[in-house]
Amino acid sequence: MDLGLKDKVAIVGGASMGIGYGIARTLALEGAHVVITARREAGLAKAAATLKAAVEKAGSKARVVPIAADCRRAEDCARVVEQTMAEFAGIDVLVNNDGAPPLGALISFDDTAWAKAVEQNLMYVVRMTRAVVPHMQARGGGGILNITAISAIQPIAGFGLSVATWSGVIGYAKTLSIEVAKDNINVNTICPGYIETQRLEKVFAADGGDPQVMRRKLEAEIPMGRIGSVDDIASMVALLVSPRGRYTTGTAIQVDGGLLRGVR
Ligand SMILES: NC(=O)c1ccc[n+]([C@@H]2O[C@H](COP(=O)([O-])OP(=O)(O)OC[C@H]3O[C@@H](n4cnc5c(N)ncnc54)[C@H](OP(=O)(O)O)[C@@H]3O)[C@@H](O)[C@H]2O)c1
């Protein structure tokens, strides 16, 4: 199936590695031009070079543009959109993805930690979306996709800063989906389960025990019996942000190998 992503312009956040990189790679291999962001310039430049090589090898003409930015800073969000418009004169796809606030017991966090979590998980999505939607409207449509986590719908102790702020993102996305449907823009959220990335390695080691023991324990909880890959997430994202996926909007979809226990 041709997703119709050729020559579309996509902004993908937190894309120097992990889930964001996997999404950028999949979109670029589908022919979309990708703007990738992350804070650390060296890692971002390396990721852009690797991605460009993969795109060229696949015979695609997609362009890859790295822009160093911290999603917690309003001025960085504005700059990413301005530079994308200067480069491509339009935006079709926005993928909001980044790192995450620290783990820990909810009552251990002070107001400063909460404010940072809100900036990172919620205000990032609010600012990027607010800046991008007018350009999608001018273009006649677009796809917006937020990456959160399975913990946003099935909370896990210790993940409270993310759970609370991502619940806000899911509510924001649902409301926005209703408001911009008339503009042919869809808005969805993906809630990944356990996905093979550097971040997950840190989660395995978080309780100070043997990471391999923790890995096996988590794998045993997953009906499919394995940790997911970034491609498992990226394939779903590519469909949802493409013209082929446009009628699906306002959803929060778990991509988790069956980890979520519940019927909705
Ligand atoms: N891996 C999993 O199992 C899993 C499961 C569910 C949900 N998630 C969520 O999915 C998202 C991505 O996770 P991941 O595993 O791919 O993480 P990762 O491998 O650590 O990659 C995170 C990416 O985001 C960038 N980033 C971090 N903070 C940023 C900031 N303030 N501004 C801009 N870019 C930033 C990082 O680059 P810089 O550090 O250079 O900025 C990097 O490119 C996270 O929100 C995570 O909580 C992950």
Image (spheres, helix red, strand yellow):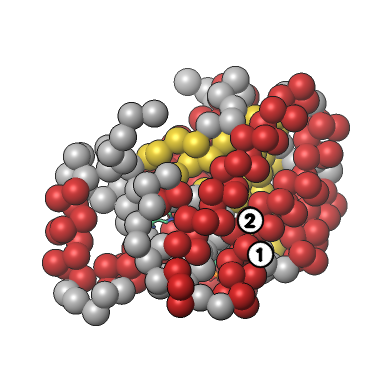
* Residue 50 in view: no
Is 165 placed left or right of 74 in the picture? left
Q: Are circles 2 and 1 on residues that touch, CB within 8 Å?
A: yes
Residue indicated by mark 1:
119
Is 210 placed left or right of 9 in the picture? left
Q: From the viewer's perspective, is residue 181 above or below residue 26?
A: above
Residue indicated by mark 2:
122
Residue shown at the point (37%, 66%) measured from the top left: 158
Spot occupied by residue 235 in the image (x, y as percentages of width and height)? 44, 37
In the rendered image, which quarter is residue 217 located in?
Answer: bottom left
Spot occupied by residue 176 in the image (x, y as percentages of width and height)? 70, 36
- For the residue pair 10 and 131, the one nearer the viewer reads as 131
Using the image, tell me which numbered label, if any, was put on residue 173.
none
Q: Which quadrant of the rendered structure holds the C terminus?
A: top left
* Residue 171 in view: yes
| Secondary structure beneath label 2 | helix
Residue shown at the point (59%, 59%) measured from the top left: 121
- For the residue pair 109 and 34, the one nearer the viewer reads as 109
Residue shown at the point (71%, 25%) measured from the top left: 181
Is 201 placed left or right of 63 in the picture? left
What's under tag 1, amino acid-wise?
Answer: Glu
Is 123 placed left or right of 106 in the picture? right
What's under tag 2, amino acid-wise?
Answer: Leu
